[in-house]
Image (cartoon, grey):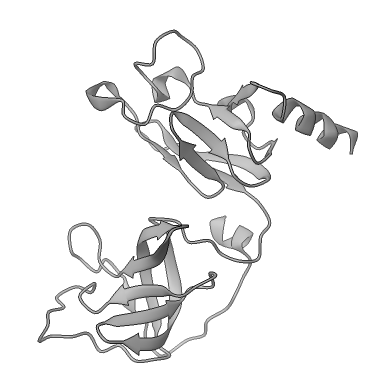
Amino acid sequence: MAQAAAVAAQSLAPGKARAARTVLDQVVLPGEELLLPEQDAEGLGGAGERPLLLNPGARSRVRVVCGPGLRRCGDRLLVTKCGRLRHKEPGGGGGVYWVDSQQKRYVPVKGDHVIGIVTAKSGDIFKVDVGGSEPASLSYLAFEGATKRNRPNVQVGDLIYGQFVVANKDMEPEMVCIDSCGRANGMGVIGQDGLLFKVTLGLIRK
């Protein structure tokens, strides 16, 4: 308890920003500002740890992605929920930062691959339940090879595997079943054989 209080006091100190690499796998609190390494924010001037630069232009050498629990606000990287800071670094550097916390309701994040249940048809749009606060929309054109004449065979109750292309607090989440090249790449309607299990978000992220 004393350790948690000390962490809270350090995190909420006025003007106090901690370097992201020094608090990996540690508890971060909402409102805390995180600084990324110099190689993740080239061109800001000075040296050492700095806030995230959103528009570095051609000088940027790496790409940093904000996952669940983090938000970009101006040139800062802010924590929006309590949990442990995690980082996954690809071969080219940068990587993905996110906050790992225990929560029951899924919050859609752009780029996440999810399995949902088709709950309704509304004109050219399917409504898909992905476990969030509201259903996601899925256009019939968001399938590989789909056209106005060649529509996919999707029925209410079908399982859909796809990814989010729109996911923020001000807009309805939108899914597609194709990648950036227009290929299904394993996404689409899942076969009728098999079982669907609901598990915790922590297990899914592992």
- In percent of width and height, residue 159 lies at 41, 82
- Indicate left or right for 168 with 197 as reference: left
In what quadrant of the picture does the C terminus appear? bottom right
- Indicate left or right for 96 with 57 as reference: right
- In percent of width and height, residue 25 lies at 65, 37
Camera-nearest residue between 166 and 85 = 166
Determine which quarter of the picture holds residue 53: top left
- Indicate left or right for 71 with 57 as reference: right
In what quadrant of the picture does the N terminus appear? top right
- Residue appearing at x 42%, y 78% in the figure: 128
Q: Residue furthest front?
A: 170
- In percent of width and height, residue 37 lies at 48, 21
Q: Is residue 101 visible?
A: yes
How many callouts does the rendering have?
A: 0
Q: Residue furthest left?
A: 149
- Residue appearing at x 55%, y 56% in the figure: 205
- Residue appearing at x 52%, y 81% in the figure: 196
Q: Residue furthest right?
A: 2
**Vertical position of residue 22 compared to residue 200: above or below:** above
Q: Is residue 97 visible?
A: no
Determine which quarter of the picture holds residue 113: bottom left
